Image (cartoon, rainbow, N blue to C red):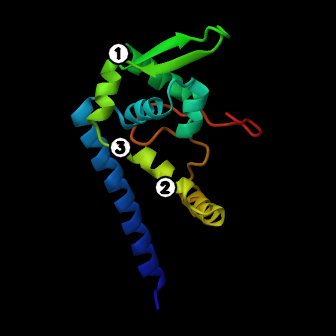
């Protein structure tokens, strides 16, 4: 039978494992590409679903559109993404990978944030709710529930959703 100390030790080890994989993968991506994990993830989303608009990328990355806009701005400045106005509705801007972006996506690993999102999609709703509740408790233990979340291992700021806001 486990005691409280054993359970705390197990929780700490699991948190270390999560941080370890996030850190190692992020460093590898940065060394190989010069991009952050969220930037590479955005490139992969554009590659898989492009042409695509900011709102759709944000939804697929589970980030706020203003966060994604900053990521896309940096990718465009580096020549990996191009913006094209819709011919039907000039307010809509479609994003596509440039040739450089297409070459990059062929030679880089999947980012852990993308893998996490994809794997969570396959988890039953009741299990997701249990995970959410457990992580919510952890956030409260640290007292950080009011801090704006950043994409994992990134300096980008993820504007939180307000109650009732869809994207």
Residue 76 visible in the displayed image: yes
Give the class, few, some or many, for how many residues have Cα within 10 Å of label 2's Cα (few <14, many ≥20). few
Q: Tell me which residue sits at (26%, 31%) in the image.
A: 33
Residue closer to the observer: 121 or 50: 50
Residues at circles 1 and 3 in contact by the CB criterion of under 8 Å = no
- Where on the picture, by quarter, is residue 90? top right
Kindly identify which numbered label has been placed on residue 114: none
Q: Which residue is mark 1?
A: 79
Q: Earlier in the sequence, mark 1 or mark 3?
A: 1
Q: Earlier in the sequence, mark 2 or mark 3?
A: 3
Q: Which mark is residue 110?
A: 3
Q: Residues within 10 Å of mark 1 (few under 14, many from 20)?
A: some
CA gap between label 2 and label 3 equals 13 Å
Q: CA distance from mark 1 to mark 3?
A: 20 Å
Local packing at callout 3 (Cα closer than 10 Å; few below 14, some 14-19, many 20+) is: some
Residue for badge 2? 119
Horizontal and vertical percent for residue 139?
56, 55
Residue in the picture at 34% in, 24% down: 101
Q: Are marks 2 and 3 in contact (CB under 8 Å)?
A: no
Question: Can residue 155 be seen by looking at this rendering?
Answer: no
Of residues 51 and 11, the one nearer the viewer is: 51
């Amino acid at each position: 039978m486990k005691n409280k100390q054993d359970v705390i030790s197990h929780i700490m080890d699991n948190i270390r494992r999560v941080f370890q994989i996030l850190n190692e993968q992020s460093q590898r991506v940065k060394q190989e590409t010069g991009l952050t994990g969220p930037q590479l993830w955005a490139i992969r989303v554009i590659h898989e679903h492009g042409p695509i608009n900011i709102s759709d990328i944000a939804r697929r990355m589970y980030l706020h559109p203003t966060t994604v806009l900053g990521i896309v701005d940096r990718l465009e400045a580096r020549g990996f993404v191009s913006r094209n106005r819709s011919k039907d509705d000039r307010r809509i801007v479609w994003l596509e990978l440039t040739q450089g972006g297409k070459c990059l996506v062929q030679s880089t690993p999947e980012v852990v944030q993308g893998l996490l999102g994809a794997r969570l999609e396959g988890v039953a709703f009741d299990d997701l709710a249990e995970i959410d509740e457990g992580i919510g408790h952890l956030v409260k233990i640290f007292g950080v529930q009011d801090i704006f979340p950043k994409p994992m291992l990134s300096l980008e700021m993820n504007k939180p959703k307000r109650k009732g806001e869809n994207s």
